[in-house]
Image (tube, rainbow, N blue to C red):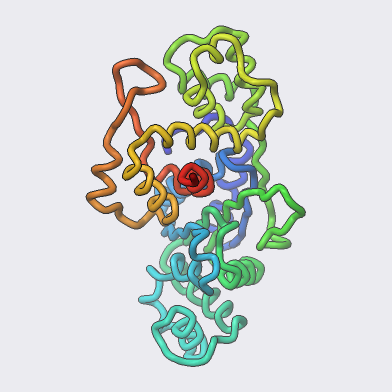
Amino acid sequence: MSHLLGRRAERESIDQLLTQARAGRCGALVVRGEAGIGKTALVEQACDTAASSGFRVESAVGVAAESLFAFAGLHQLCGPLLSRLDALPDPQQAALGVAFGSRSGPPPDRFLVGLATLSLLAEVAEERPLLCLVDDAQWLDEASAKVLAFVARRLSAERVALLFALRDSGEADNSPFPGLPELRLEGLGEADAQGLLAAAVPTRLDDAVRDRIVAEARGNPLALLELPRSTRAVHLAGGFEPPDALSVPRRVEDGFRRRSASLPAETQLLLLVAAADDRRDRPRTPRLRRVATPRGPSPRRPGTTTHRPPATVGHRYGGVRRARRP
């Protein structure tokens, strides 16, 4: 990502994490915040920064559909590193092999799986610094989350950085990474929010309407991008519904649901399939790509077409599912 509005302090925190890892002082950081607040954008910029400065970057994405499969998330993260497995002690090799299904045996001791993961990351980092990214960590399976928390607490002098993006649940704190440093993302400041809104809406907004949108979005970047697109022109001219009628993430989700409801039934079904598979590295089938071609009038400019690609609605599976109900 070439440009990220605001977030100067947050970017500095991540830059410090990378600088320390490069110098052999490993660390971990949990980026937290509500849906749409910009966690993924910050993580993607961290990925770009690390890759351009010589880090090896490995990543995983929590998948709600895989949250009951033990070690599914860990396999995503460590799968590309398994060529170095031979460097580990035999018990650790066996533990990871059984956990990942490449060896037969009884369920592995999770302490050994944790030690094996720690040893594997340290071994890979001998060549060059290593950044491990986990987005949507709230959907990691429990076994993977516990192993990664174990590893993060025991890294010492390795050139390894762990970065987790975790969506707040709105309930009592139930972080899968207790004790790790946290970076909480709040809404954008007013100036940055206005700048993002101006970039999202090609037509000039009345000052009062702009201020109302900024106030209701509460600095949530996704809301600033999506609320104007899912709002009728008459509302844009005269304002939105009263503040606090719905939470910002819920209102954005409802906007996606309304827009998807106008699509053909077959397209809605394929959107549902795409939303149920959150893994970003899985190539979409040619049929799904054909369905994602522009359809219908654009909410932004008459005479043009637009369609949000299925990958973008992945984390809004609940809204797409509700749209399919009778």
Q: In this view of the protein, which residue sits in the foreground, 89 or 238?
A: 238
Kindly indicate the quadrant of the structure image that contains residue 54.
bottom left
Q: Quadrant of the N terminus?
A: top left
Q: Residue furthest front?
A: 326
Kindly identify the residue that appears in the image at 61 percent across and 58 percent down.
Answer: 28
Kindly indicate the quadrant of the structure image that contains residue 12.
top right
Kindly identify the residue that appears in the image at 60 percent across and 20 percent down.
Answer: 213
- Label tally: 0
Kindly identify the residue that appears in the image at 59 percent across and 48 percent down.
Answer: 16
Residue 147 on image: x %, y %: 59, 72
For residue 261, above or below residue 133: above
Q: Residue furthest right?
A: 172
For residue 172, above or below residue 223: below
Q: Is residue 216 visible to us here?
A: yes
Kindly indicate the quadrant of the structure image that contains residue 59.
bottom left
Q: Is residue 45 visible to us here?
A: no
Q: Is residue 220 left or right of residue 41?
A: right
Residue 41 on image: x %, y %: 50, 41
Residue 282 on image: x %, y %: 34, 57
